[in-house]
Amino acid sequence: MMNFALTEEQEAVRKMVRTFVDREINPHIQEWDAKGHFETSILKRLAELDLMGVCIPEKYGGSGMDYNTLAIVCEELERGDTAFRTAVSVHTGLNSMTILQWGDEFQKEKYLVPQARGQKVAAFGLTEPNAGSDVAAMQTTARREGSEYILNGSKTWISLCDVADNFLIFAKTDKEKGHHGISCFIVERTFPGVTTKAIKGKLGIRAGNTGEVFLEDVRVPAENRLGEEGEGFKIAMSALDNGRFTVGAGACGLINASLEASLKYCHERKTFGKEIGKHQLVQQMIAKMTANLEISRLLVYRAGWLKNQGKRNTRETSLAKWYACDAAFEAANDAVQIHGAYGYSNEYPVERFLRNAKAPVIYEGTREIHTIMQGEYALGYRVDKPLRKMLPAWPFEE
């Protein structure tokens, strides 16, 4: 039976992260955003709070909490700014949870444990300049040579590119097999031939680190291949189930931030002799934010509940990500409208919310990709098959 009432532990985590955001992110975020500065000390503080491996089993260095607790952490971080939720999404959702699901014991001990403890920072390299939604179009290659693979290519729009210690890199091991010829590798920054470069001039998430990863004759030990040769596409899609889950959860935080800012302004601003909150069309926008926050949370928690059961959740996670991200963009847009001309100025945070809200509608499956997915599920054209490996159900067995 599904029960989405938060436990005492989850309530305590929400309170802790909210307090952390209000004390250590919100007082500085406007400045960091304006300067395009990613504050790496926040990652160190999250590690100190045991939040870089919140849903990783304790035996692998994590906190051992359930997947919906990860959702709560992501929601509260994005209430501060999308940049820091993105960091946890990539480090934990896309990378660490993927190693947890697909890695062998050697890989878990060497890479997952320090990542879950926050001693190492991890990133995810799938997107390329000419391969976004069309994953099979990737041009990065991996050639087997004895006990190593030699990787060549580039990745783009990689979050944490300049600060990550480890990357999950997807590359073609067989160009003739399309998406069946993709494999996944754990690549360390220190491997010769790995370089990165930040992308500047972004519309939003300016306080985050995003960029390109270049691979030039990078020699990767065969023991660093995650899963079998040719399983890279399945691994990538399962990773996106985790990443999309955290993105949808974060979107709830942006809706909440937009709502909180709007409620405050509605009581402060007066027009025609009364608070603007008294105007019915303003109330309509507030009501819509409120409803969408509750709907989005329920969709996210349902996907998290399935993860806790160790069940496939691609359809449910896609729906949660699609709905919540669209709702977050709408909430931020309405928040700017409620603030009027002030909403167009960085004197108030809502203009940043609107800029930040656009990226999640695009990354980890565009709105259009998720629309197609949901249509195909409803029509019976798409049916999920069991994966060779699934995330461990919670509570974790030690």
Image (spheres, rainbow, N blue to C red):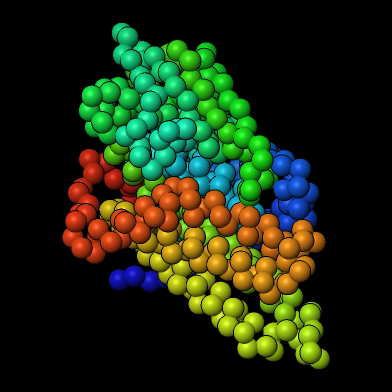
Left or right placement of residue 295 versus residue 289 in this view? left
Q: Position of residue 116 (x, y in %)?
A: 50, 39
The x and y percentages for residue 310 are: 30, 53
The picture quadrant where one finds residue 309 is bottom left
Where residue 286 sits, quadrant-wise, is: bottom right
Point out residue 275 in the picture as x, y percentages from the top left corner.
Answer: 76, 86
Total labels drawn: 0
**Residue ID at (49%, 55%):** 361
Q: Is residue 256 above or below residue 125?
A: below
Residue 70 visible to the viewer: no
Residue lying farthest to the bottom in this orientation: 273
Which quadrant, please, contains the C terminus?
A: top left
**Residue at x 76% of width, y 43% of height:** 35
Q: Residue 176 occupies which quadrant of the picture?
A: top left
Quadrant (top left/top right/bottom left/bottom right) for the N terminus: bottom left
Q: Looking at the image, can residue 363 be seen?
A: yes
Q: Give the residue at x 47% y 58%.
A: 248
Query: In the image, 110: left or right of 87?
Result: left
Frontmost residue, 143 versus 245: 143
Compared to 386, does 252 lie above or below?
Answer: below
Relative image position of residue 288 (x, y in whole percent): 54, 77
Residue at image location 63% in from the left, 60% down from the top: 354
Instruction: Name above or below for residue 194 compared with residue 81.
Output: above
For residue 97, side relative to residue 122 (left or right) = left
Left or right relative to 53: residue 267: right
